Amino acid sequence: MINPQWLHTFAVLVEKGNFTRTAEAIGITQAAVSQHISRLEEEYGTLFLRRPRQLEITPIGENLLTYVKDVECAQKRLQQKLIHDDAEVGDISLITPGSIGLTLFPLLIELQQAFPALNIRHRFAPDSEIVASVLANEHEIGMVTLKPSDPRIHSTHFTEEPLELVVPACHKQNEWVDLQRLGFISHPDGEAMATRLLSRKYPSNPGIQDIPCKGFTNQISLILEPVAKGLGFTVIPQYARKAFERQQDIYVVECGSQVVDTIWLIHRAEWPLSRRAQKAITFLKGKI
């Protein structure tokens, strides 16, 4: 690595054009200035042509000067990121499950419309990928349904999300035999969610495996499409159901006491959230 002091001496010498004035500006001896330049020239080649009363920078010197300016710019950008943590300017990175994500996405757009200098990056993913992404510093904020036990992760309660039994609007008679006749629209968490909720609604039921599967999709925004068209029923989180546009085409069956998942907000425990992230969280909590 190049000695930063040598580079600083070189840049001042280019500006002053004289070894004596450079030594005075930096507060070192003229011999020290010459030594710094000599060390750089040993490494890279001739930086100046020495003429009487004049120094002429060489192409090698020009390239080195460009490098020095790039380093100075990089240092300024780093300083701005580390010191000037602006709540209304910069990047916000968030990774969430699809269900809560469907609700958050339009809210994040609303936040960015209010503060156009924010750059919001939002990704949908399963819990395991969310935790891995936060640990790898790929996303500053995450949300998960299972609270992580990893000590590197700080978790706080964000909201709660009940599971819902959703059927076509035209099928409101929902005894177990009605569900068998209708069929199940599944998704990656479908069987697990259905087992938890249906055991509460129908305590003596033989299990979701007793109901024919009429469809499957891994796109949470599409799960209710076949339900709305009368092709089956499903069990999904409430936020996913609320994000569906055609509420008139579906019906939520009352299941008695709710089966509720907690949504946990997570971030790296070793350092605080940026002011931008804090602003986003406060905004979202006020809208949920």
Image: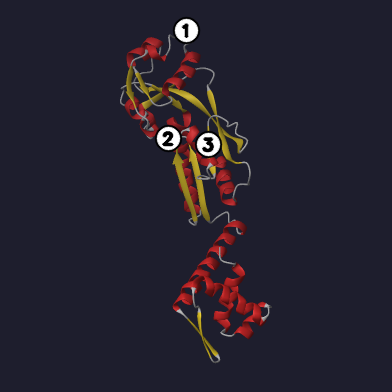
Indicate whether 30 appears above or below 285: below
Say how the picture is coloured.
Answer: secondary structure
How many numbered marks appear?
A: 3
Identity of the amino acid at label 2?
Answer: Ala
Q: Secondary structure at mark 1?
A: loop
Residue 51 on image: x %, y %: 52, 89
Identity of the amino acid at label 3?
Answer: Val
| CB atoms of marks 1 and 2 within 8 Å | no
- Tell me which label, 1 or 2, sits earlier in the chain: 1
Q: Image point 53% across, 27% down: which residue? A: 261
Q: Secondary structure at mark 2?
A: loop
Q: Residue furthest bottom?
A: 52
Residue 288 visible in the current orientation: no
Mark 1 against mark 3, which lies toward the viewer? 3
Residue 98 visible in the current orientation: yes
- Tell me which label, 3 or 2, sits earlier in the chain: 3
Q: Say left or right for 80 vs 252.
A: right
Q: Say left or right for 34 vs 211.
A: right
Residue 50 on image: x %, y %: 52, 86
Residue 149 on image: x %, y %: 60, 31
- Structural distance between the alpha carbons of marks 1 and 2: 32 Å
Q: Nearer the viewer, residue 34 or 227?
A: 34
| CB atoms of marks 3 and 2 within 8 Å | no
- Structural distance between the alpha carbons of marks 3 and 2: 25 Å
Q: Which residue is mark 3?
A: 131
Name the mark on residue 243. Answer: 2
Q: Nearer the viewer, residue 239 or 43?
A: 43
Q: Image point 58% across, 54% down: which residue? A: 87
- Structural distance between the alpha carbons of marks 1 and 3: 37 Å
Q: Image point 32% across, 26% down: which residue? A: 226
Q: Which residue is mark 1?
A: 204
Identity of the amino acid at label 1?
Answer: Ser
